[in-house]
Amino acid sequence: MKAAESWHGVDPGAGHGGGLHLHVVTDPCGESTAERKDMSQIPADLRFAESHEWARLESDGTVTVGISDHAQKALGDVVFVELTEVGRVFTAGEPAGVVESVKAASDIYSPVGGKVTMINEELSESPELLNEEPYDSWIFKLKPSDKSELNSLLDAAGYKAAIGD
């Protein structure tokens, strides 16, 4: 590690079986990334993992997955998204990709178990969409192996309380 770098570990889900694990690099002047627009409205139709992924049950029975506004703010400017593959099967809480920013890299965890049916290829060319529209920009969709796993996720009010918002 260079002398000008300082590392800060962030683990909001410590003790809860996972969390957004960040290693944040700041410059010696403590410069931060550009201000983000306030998006404190947490959509009521979403469920949240303690590791800051959101999940939305769609009318066709699939689950759409993305990262929360809180997570994208903690990460800073997203510069790369490592997408999973269609057909991969995950258990709830299993790493399912990586989001890299100018100051951190973070695993993305599958909030529920299931088989990936789609990935958002647009993020390969425009990863900044996760910063600009975190609740509209999804990462992958899956067919859940057990829809009842959604019940173990936080609702909007529970997530808002968990992040202290």
Image (cartoon, rainbow, N blue to C red):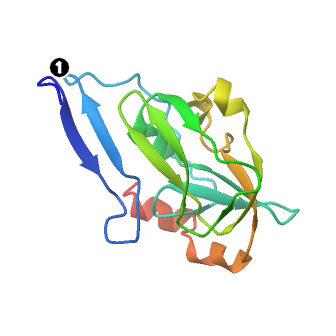
Query: Which one is nearer the viewer's eye here, 94 or 34?
Result: 94
Position above or below: 162 against 40: below
Position above or below: 52 against 122: below
**Whole-percent x and y of residue 7?**
21, 38
What residue appears at the point 18 percent right and 28 percent down from the top-left corner?
Answer: 5
Indicate the secondary structure of the residue bearing disc 1: loop
Query: Which one is nearer the viewer's eye here, 42 or 47?
Result: 47
Placement of the N terminus among the 4 image quadrants: top left
**Whole-percent x and y of residue 32?**
31, 25
Q: Quadrant of residue 103?
A: top left
What residue appears at the point 55 percent right and 55 percent down from the top-left corner?
Answer: 53
Q: Quadrant of residue 45?
A: bottom right
Label 1 Cα neighbours within 10 Å, binned few <14 / some 14-19 / many ≥20: few
Query: Which one is nearer the viewer's eye here, 158 or 6?
Result: 6
| Three-letter amino acid code of the residue under disc 1 | Cys
Q: Which residue is mark 1?
A: 29
Query: Which one is nearer the viewer's eye here, 77 or 114?
Result: 114
What residue appears at the point 57 percent right and 52 percent down from the top-left corner?
Answer: 42
**Whole-percent x and y of residue 80?**
54, 30
